[in-house]
Image (tube, rainbow, N blue to C red):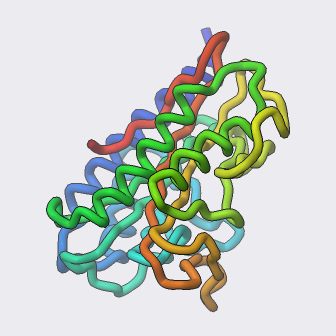
Amino acid sequence: MPKDKLEIMTEGGQILGVILSEIRTAAVPGITTRDLDDLTRRLCLKYKVKPSFLGYQGYPGAICISLNDEVVHGIPNETVIASTDLISLDFGVFHEGYHVDAAFTFTFDDNDWAKQKLIKTAKDALYLAIDQISPGMKIGDIGYVIQHYVEQKGFGVVRSLVGHGVGKELHENPLIPNFGQKNTGTILKKGMTLAIEPMITNGDYEVYQESDGWTYKTCDHSLSSHYEHTIYIDDNNATILTVLPE
């Protein structure tokens, strides 16, 4: 019997998790972001998937690596990762006709409480939103949950970058802002596959795009954290399809 969309995207999400775990292990102070991109390409060949981002609208990397005040879409280059960096890895794979997409942020210093709180808040906001997703709720409900939680913790929610549908295309409708009002927007339905991805800052929420045409940074150069999962909406709730390193 042919595999259905859910089976294929679940497999893709598991492969994505394995690759991200290996990249996280390799991401140590002294390595360049280009080294990690090269590793990503090799791992995609090893696990027989295609990197979703490579060549997408001209993006030159297989993975997005954003450091410190970079919010998303950091292009791998000769930048050397430092022990003090805040690092966000955003990665997607294309497996048997479907994309899955995930992201997480980490730092090497477990005792840097300010960075740890920022990371934890983005992660907790993601899981809090996913826990409440069910058929019949609306897009605005997701944004409201994320915004309320993040701002209550004292952080900013990026407005101009949002989550999205994902499946046969990397970016599909509906768009999913990380802010909003309850009971507004598109109604969620069983069978939808969505990328939920809080992007938050420890300062103002305004961002700008660098001259490379991809990298987004916070305008006030405050630190940023990004967490993302691909989910599937079933009869009663949402199932996470992607796997992130612990």
Question: Seen in the image, is 179 located left or right of residue 155?
Answer: right
For residue 24, above or below residue 28: above
Q: Residue at x 64, y 81 (%)?
A: 208
Q: Is residue 45 visible?
A: no
Question: x and y percent of residue 21 in the render?
Answer: 28, 48
Q: Residue at x 71, y 66 (%)?
A: 160
Question: Seen in the image, is 47 located left or right of residue 208?
Answer: left
Q: Quadrant of the C terminus?
A: top left
Question: x and y percent of residue 132 in the render?
Answer: 58, 26
Q: Quadrant of the N terminus?
A: top right
Q: Is residue 59 visible?
A: yes
Question: x and y percent of residue 219 in the render?
Answer: 58, 83
For residue 226, above or below residue 124: below
Q: Residue at x 81, y 33 (%)?
A: 183
Question: x and y percent of residue 79 in the render?
Answer: 34, 85
Q: Residue at x 50, y 30 (%)?
A: 241
For residue 132, above or below residue 165: above
Towards the viewer: 80 or 99: 80
How many numbered marks, from 0 up? 0
For residue 88, above or below residue 136: below
Question: Seen in the image, is 17 located left or right of residue 229?
Answer: left
State which quadrant residue 218 falls in.
bottom right
Question: Seen in the image, is 133 located left or right of residue 86?
Answer: right
Towards the viewer: 75 or 163: 163
The residue furthest bottom is: 211
